[in-house]
């Protein structure tokens, strides 16, 4: 039985390794919320960086109309489900890591010319409108440099954009439950 627990722990560490690296080095409780179309899944962890312990886990059902079109439509129902999980599991953490559904996200791979890595961010935000089929005023935009070619003076970049109304619908439900969203990622990642 002890060996099985160690094996599961090692698998969990390997599986969640990149996810856990999002957490700061301070020892404290964090809350992961996955707000899906039929339920809210919760995982409370405590620790630092890659050394996390699971403190509690839970699942609360949602009404069928709570999430529609990858957006929270019934904020009150989602907030109620989150609060029920917090109360039932006596959750201490208030800093939340959450995700938005992949289908609600625009993901594009692009190559940008750049002579100087320091100006790359300016170039990306200036040119991103050519790759994102939505007004940049209506989206939250982030990027990750995948490769920087100094000879070709270009950078291969992964652009990720989410409409503000989508991300705000999830953030509102979390904040209404008295929590603080600190990381919002894409469920594909």
Image (spheres, rainbow, N blue to C red):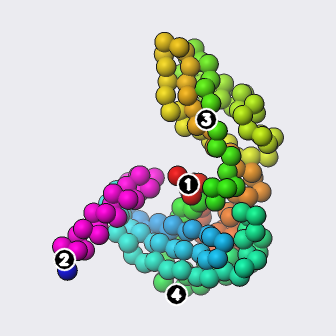
Q: Nearer the viewer, mark 2 or mark 1?
A: 1
Q: Nearer the viewer, mark 4 or mark 3?
A: 3
Q: Nearer the viewer, mark 2 or mark 4?
A: 2
Give how far apart the Cα atoms at labels 3 and 1 are.
15 Å
Q: Position of residue 39 (x, y in %)?
A: 61, 77
Question: Callout 4: few (<14), some (14-19), or many (20+) C-alpha neighbours within 10 Å?
Answer: few
Q: What residue range appears in magenta?
A: 3-26
Q: Magenta stretch: residue 111 in it?
A: no
Placement of 178 over or under 81, stated as above or below: above
- Frontmost of labels 3 and 2 is 3
How far, Cα to Cα, is label 2 from label 1? 33 Å
Side (left or right) of 23 relative to 76: left
Is residue 4 rendered to the left or right of residue 169? left
Q: Is residue 93 visible?
A: no
Residue picked out by circle 1:
188
Q: Are marks 3 and 1 in contact (CB under 8 Å)?
A: no
Residue 109: where, in percent of width, then height?
61, 35
Q: Secondary structure at mark 4?
A: helix
Q: Secondary structure at mark 1?
A: loop
Choose the circle earlier in sequence order: 2 or 1.
2
Earlier residue among tags 2 and 4: 2
Q: In the structure shown, which secondary structural element does the residue marked by tag 2 occupy?
A: helix
- What residue is shown at x 72% (from left), y 34% (from top)? 131
Q: Please name the residue that numbered disc 3 is placed on.
A: 109
């Amino acid at each position: 039985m002890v060996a099985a627990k160690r094996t599961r722990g090692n698998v969990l560490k390997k599986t969640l390794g990149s996810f856990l690296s999002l957490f700061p080095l301070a020892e404290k409780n964090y809350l992961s919320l996955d707000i899906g179309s039929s339920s809210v899944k919760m995982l409370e962890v405590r620790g630092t960086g890659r050394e996390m312990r699971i403190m509690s886990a839970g699942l609360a059902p949602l009404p069928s109309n709570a999430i529609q079109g990858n957006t929270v439509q019934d904020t009150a129902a989602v907030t109620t489900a989150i609060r029920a999980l917090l109360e039932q599991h006596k959750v201490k953490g208030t800093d939340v890591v959450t995700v938005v559904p992949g289908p609600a996200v625009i993901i594009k791979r692009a190559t940008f010319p750049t002579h100087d890595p320091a100006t790359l961010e300016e170039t990306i935000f200036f040119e991103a409108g050519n790759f994102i089929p939505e007004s940049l005023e209506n989206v939250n935009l982030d990027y990750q440099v995948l490769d920087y070619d100094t000879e070709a003076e270009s950078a291969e970049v992964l652009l990720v954009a989410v409409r503000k109304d989508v991300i705000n619908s999830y953030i509102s439900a979390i904040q209404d439950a008295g929590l603080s969203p600190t990381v919002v990622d894409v469920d594909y990642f």
